[in-house]
Amino acid sequence: MNLPIRPRRNRQSPAIRDLVRETEVTPGHLIYPLFIQDGSADTPIDSMPGCQRWSLSGLVKEAGEAHALGIPAVVLFPRIPDDQKTPLAEESFNPDGLVPRAIRALKSAHPTLTVITDVALDPYNSDGHDGIVAPDGRILNDETVEVLCRQALCHAEAGADIISPSDMMDGRVAAIRAALDQAGFTGVSILSYTAKYASAFYGPFRGALDSAPKSGDKKTYQMDPANTREAEREARLDEAEGADILMVKPAGAYLDIIARLRATTMLPIAAYQVSGEYLMIKSAAASGWLDEKKIVHETLLSIRRAGADMILTYFAKSFASDWKK
Ligand code: PBG
């Protein structure tokens, strides 16, 4: 064939493939989500094989190992006992609560590890919703934002580096920014769950924390999976309200949303490979039909290729320990 243009020339050896590769994923791009609980036991999570709910000492050890492998940050998710859950979620801003104690333990053991905290009421709220539920079942926006601000301040006072509101209430980024600044925490960042969809992929996470809504669903605050333009609208608002980083969640089924936000914002973008995405890979690999390491690498690479700067993934530590092997 008379073919002057042969794209395969750029794929002909590992060395050339290295030179032309457009996207990379390294441990430095990853954020490791960790579940925590009170007490001295580390408990395996049935709905997420390979994940544990860590005691504080287990957390410090696990986070330290991940950090030593090159993971720059962790994000904390607490399991709160039922007797501490209330309709107004007061435990969410208890300065001696589980999350503030975990932040202090992590920052004193690993000063260079970035500690991110999730801000939302669902682990603390007896109704299992991210916001306060009115007697008629509505989720109250403005009343919830006041509690989220107290929760964010409580985390900042304990030493959190980044506050990450996952609740999807309107106006919470601006309110949290103002509350942090007023208290002198101008250096504490906000990683906003900007486009968080009402997704069935969160099922295993709610199992891990016993945090499923007691009634109704989250569709009046989380986004409709059918919508794209709405994600851009949320992104513009979060940017104007002072968010430092925008998040898309879930990741794998929402790569188009990541790409769209990448094209419209100058801010860094995070994507969350959520519990259902984790479980699908784990289950398929357990059956022996998929190669876990290769699938994890390919999914993370795809999320990066779509435009994410950083990825929250339960595979963070295992990816980092396999990296370059
Ligand atoms: C709660 C929260 C959820 C996740 C992160 N923060 C669950 C939900 O919104 O119901 C899901 C994470 C995952 O599935 O891995 N605010």
Image: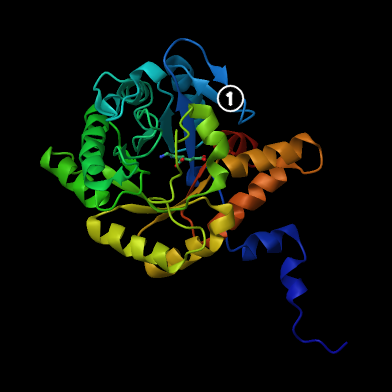
**Can see residue 219?**
yes
Q: Position of residue 70 (x, y in %)?
A: 50, 37
Q: Position of residue 104 (x, y in %)?
A: 31, 22
Residue appearing at x 73%, y 58% in the figure:
14
Most distant residue in the bottom direction: 2
Q: Which residue is mark 1?
A: 45
Q: Is residue 314 above or below residue 298?
A: above
Return the residue nearer the eye: 44 or 106: 44
Drawn side of residue 257 relative to residue 133, left or right: right
Return the residue nearer the eye: 34 or 142: 142
Q: What kind of residue is marked 1?
A: Ile
Name the image quarter holding the N terminus: bottom right
Label 1 C-beta lies within 8 Å of the nearest ligand 1 atom = no
Most distant residue in the left direction: 182
Query: Mark 1, residues whose alpha carbon is within 10 Å: few (<14), some, or many (≥20)?
Result: some
Most distant residue in the right direction: 1
Residue 103 occupies quadrant:
top left
Q: Position of residue 78 (x, y in %)?
A: 41, 26
Drawn side of residue 189 relative to residue 20, left or right: left
Q: Is residue 233 above or below residue 325?
A: below
Return the residue nearer the eye: 226 or 155: 226
Q: Is residue 50 above or below residue 25?
A: above
Tell me the SS state at disc 1: loop
Residue appearing at x 43%, y 24% in the figure:
79
Residue appearing at x 21%, y 34% in the figure:
150
Color encoding of the figure: rainbow
Residue appearing at x 41%, y 15% in the figure:
38
Most distant residue in the front direction: 136
**Can see residue 325?**
no
